[in-house]
Every structure is written in C-alpha cells, then in structure tokens.
Image (cartoon, grey):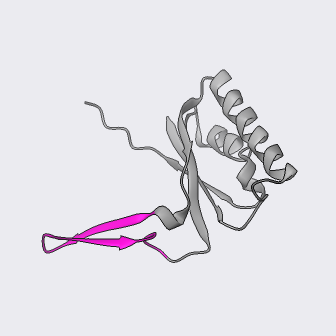
Amino acid sequence: MQYICLIYSAENAGPKPGTPEFGTMLQAYQKFTQDVQDKGLFVAGDALQPVSTATTVTTENGKVEITDGPFAETKETLGGYYILDCKSLDEAIEQAAKIPTAEHGRIEVRPVMVFDD
C-alpha cells in the first residue's frame, strides 16, 4: 500500500541554509532517500518551494478565485513529501520517523487512495 509522508515545519525551524548543520541535514535527507530506494519503498518525493510562492485556487459559482499564499494561516507549512510503498502503516510510520525534519517539525502519514484504471 502507498503512504504519503507530508513534511511540515515552521519555515524558521531547523538548521539554516549556509550553516554546517544545514549541510548535515541535507546529507541525512540524501541518506534517507537512498535507504528507501534501496529497500524498494520509494515511489516519489520532492521538496517544495517556500510557502511565499504558493497560490491557492478556488471556484465559487463558476468564478475562479486566486489567492497568494497557502489556504490556511499556520506556523507549520508543507515543505515536501515522500510517497512510500509499505507493507503496513507501522512500516510507513517507522520510515517517517527517519525523515530528518521529524526532529524539528512533523511528518503526517496518510494512506494514498489509488484508483485502478
């Protein structure tokens, strides 16, 4: 079953770019990605641009409305994701706990609803 691991943190949380700690975190992400690839669990994953680049789209009565920024005002924002193909929720949680941002943010694990063609 596929699970999405949504990576949330406050934009100012965790190591800052340009610091040795940031480099260490990036290496940890590379290691995690390689590990889930080696185990055959990796389906997809990417980091997202900062929340300041977000655009929210809604439609009301057939009219498209566009708002700069995320839908919800929140301290923690979605920074990236992994989609993993795991045998169980327990395995997905075990892998999610290894995502480096779990140390200063949160990882939401949710089953993916896959529709057959």
Rendered residue at 39%/65% (across/down):
55
Where is 32 relative to 93, above or below? above
User: Which residues, given as a range, are shown in magenta?
Assistant: 54-72
**Foreground pick, 33 / 98:** 33
Report x, y in % for residue 69.
Answer: 45, 70
Quadrant containing the C terminus is: top left
Report x, y in % for residue 77.
Answer: 57, 65
**Foreground pick, 103 / 90:** 103
Q: Is residue 4 left or right of residue 117?
A: right
**Foreground pick, 101 / 1:** 101
Rendered residue at 51%/77% (across/down):
73
Q: Residue 65 colored magenta?
A: yes
Q: Residue 64 colored magenta?
A: yes
**Foreground pick, 68 / 62:** 68
Looking at this view, name the residue that lies furthest to the bottom: 73
Q: Is residue 35 left or right of residue 76?
A: right
Where is 93 relative to 72, above or below? above
Rendered residue at 48%/62% (across/down):
53
Report x, y in % for residue 31.
Answer: 75, 33
Rendered residue at 49%/37% (across/down):
2
